[in-house]
Image (cartoon, rainbow, N blue to C red):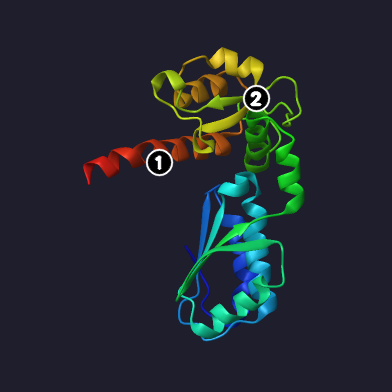
Amino acid sequence: MRRLTRDGDGDHVALALSASYRGERVISIGFGELESVRQGPATRLVREACRLLQPWGREGRIELRSLRRPVRRTFLEWLSGTEDVTVVAAARRKLVLLPGPEERERLEATLTPTRRKMLRLAERDGEHCVWCSAQLTYRSLHATVDHIRCRSHGGADALDNLVLSCAPCNHRRANEPASIYLETCLDSGATVDVDAVLRAIARSHSHHEKPRLLRAA
């Protein structure tokens, strides 16, 4: 969770948020003991969070936590006059926001579910195959969604478990574990997006561990 410690921190936290974001579905921002915020820096911070969450579409959420009454009022006044963000839950010291750019929704409505995932993956990790860095977009004929944990091993179709891959790389990998295929690609001299692959492996592991933890509880 990112925190603001003084009123002037909005722009700095927006930059820090962009630098530290690793593709999470929920961005949580805490306001500590702030008694007030200026609308400009606060709204720039929220808009930066909206930009980062674009790959998640309607699944992305922004949580504003530890809101004192004047801070909460500032946000609600701004939110009442903008169509960029919608309040989906409100508590005494917390607001949950849904980014909702209209153009994005219109575009996604024209796509198949698979192409919609490709669009989000390309925006999250970049418009390229994570295994060889060949240029790809959601429009590319040879673009595929590759499961980090293979479906044959119980891998889900959720974005947390997917990366954008060209068809040749996807076919070569087959059911090989992602960590092993990563080593294979590096040994062959392929231009792998190592950071994107490692983040995807971490997200996939977290996604598939959650049900197990819940059952254990």
> Which residue is drawn at the image coordinates 49% and 33% (left, top)?
161
The amino acid beneath tag 2 is Cys
**Can you tell which mark lies on residue 145?**
none
Q: Residues within 10 Å of mark 1 (few under 14, many from 20)?
A: few
**Residue drawn at x 50%, y 83% as measured from the top left:** 69
Disc sitting over residue 206 in the figure: 1
Q: Quadrant of residue 159?
A: top right
- Residue lying at 47% horizontally and 35% vertically, measured from the top left: 201
Secondary structure type for disc 1: helix
The residue lying toward the viewer, choosing from 166 and 195, is 166
Q: Which three-letter amino acid code belongs to the residue tagged 1?
A: Ser
| Between 211 and 92, the one nearer to me in the picture | 92
Residue 102: x and y, percent? 74, 52
Mark carried by residue 132:
2
Residue 172 lies, in percent from the top left, at: 57, 13
Measured Cα–Cα span from mark 2 to mark 1: 25 Å
Q: Is 15 above or below relative to 173?
A: below
**Where residue 29 sits in the image (x, y, percent)?**
51, 66
176 lies left or right of 20:
left
Identify which residue is drawn at 45% across, 27% down. 149
Disc 2, disc 1: CB below 8 Å? no
